[in-house]
Amino acid sequence: MPKMKTNRSAAKRFTKTGSGKFARRRQNLRHILTKKNAKRTRRLGQGTLVDKANEKAVRRLLPYA
């Protein structure tokens, strides 16, 4: 059976944590920042984990992660 291909766009967006979960960046921090308050932009700058409902899809995109 041939090797599976890693989805390269997903590989650039997700990293695997030590516990086996996937980390991601938050959305909404690229533009239209003037109407977002400082507390919100600070929180958006922090990463977070992929939701349990989407973890199976990410795992399929990254078979060797």
Image (spheres, helix red, strand yellow):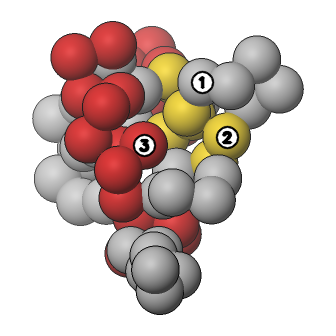
Closest to the observer: 28 or 37? 28
Determine whether 7 is above or below 43 in the image.
below
Earlier-in-chain disc, 2 versus 1? 2
- Residue 59 in percent (x, y) is at 42, 43
Secondary structure, mark 2, is strand
Count of marks placed on residues: 3
Q: Which residue is mark 3?
A: 59
- Residue 40 in percent (x, y) is at 37, 20
In this view, which residue lies farthest toward the front? 1
Q: Amino acid at mark 1?
A: Lys
Residue 38: quarter of image: top left
- Residue 22 in percent (x, y) is at 55, 33
Mark 2–mark 1 CB contact (< 8 Å): yes
Earlier-in-chain disc, 1 versus 3? 1
For image coordinates 51% across by 57% down, the residue present is: 63
Q: Amino acid at mark 2?
A: Lys
